[in-house]
Image (cartoon, rainbow, N blue to C red):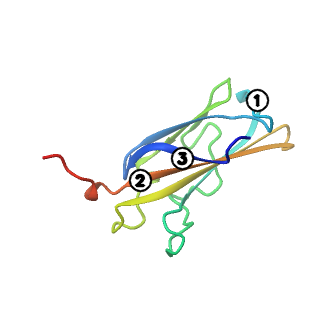
Amino acid sequence: MGNFRQIWAGLVCEGKSAALRLQLTDEDDADLPGSDIEVLTLTLYNASNPKSADFGAILNDRDAQDILGENGGMVSAEGLLTLRFSPDDNALLNQRRGFETHVALIEWEWGSGTGKGAKEFSFTVANQSKLPRES
């Protein structure tokens, strides 16, 4: 299944929409057709500072939330997941921080639950009020 956690390139501004794309694969990294996916969930959580009280906090109630054709998730016939994050998904927990690290854990099942896959994407959410301004 390749690397479990990947860095999602780029910066997401707090309170803005974003989209993530992921090819769903089996245990041999072969593409799974969208019709084979039976379960698809998202857990979105804060991973900014392990010493912080809000480390691991679930964001926007997205705790193993069903995203198979709903809640911003869409899977093509070829098994390509497009996941749309709403502005509320990209809110900061602590406005004193310039940036927060958020993680999207995507889990899927096929074959009546005999096959299971997962991938984590770590991304940075920027505090708009702390971003440098152009003069």
Residue 60 location in percent, x, y?
50, 58
Name the residue carrying label 1: 30
**Marks 1 and 3, how far apart in space?**
21 Å
Q: How far apart are the alpha carbons under marks 2 and 1?
A: 31 Å
Residue drawn where x is 85% and y is 37% of the image: 111
Q: Nearer the viewer, mark 1 or mark 3?
A: 3
Question: For the residue labelled by badge 1, is the local secondary structure a helix, a strand or a loop?
Answer: loop
Q: Is residue 100 left or right of residue 105?
A: left
Disc 3 residue type? Ile
Direction from residue 73 to residue 126 in the image, left or right: left
Which one is in front in this view, the residue at disc 2 or the one at disc 3?
3
Tell me where residue 8 appears, x and y as whole percent: 51, 44
* Residue positioned 49% across, 74% down in the render: 52
Number of marks: 3
The disc at residue 7 is 3
Residue type at numbered disc 1: Ala
Q: Residues within 10 Å of mark 3 (few under 14, many from 20)?
A: few
> Of marks 2 and 3, which one's residue comes earlier in the chain?
3
Observer-nearest residue: 135 or 40? 135
Mark 1 or mark 3: name the one nearer the start of the chain.
3
Instruction: Give the alpha-carbon distance from disc 2 to disc 3, as whole Å.
Output: 12 Å
Q: Quadrant of the N terminus?
A: top right
Q: Seen from this angle, which residue lies furthest front?
A: 3
Element under label 3? strand
| Left or right relative to 134: residue 121 | right
> Which residue bears the numbered disc 2?
125
Q: Nearer the viewer, residue 126 or 63?
A: 126
x and y percentages locating residue 20 in the rendered image: 52, 38
Pointer 2 with pointer 1, Cβ within 8 A: no
Is 14 situated above or below 57? above
Instruction: For label 1, count other residues whose C-alpha is less than 10 Å away and answer few (under 14), some (14-19) or many (20+).
Output: few
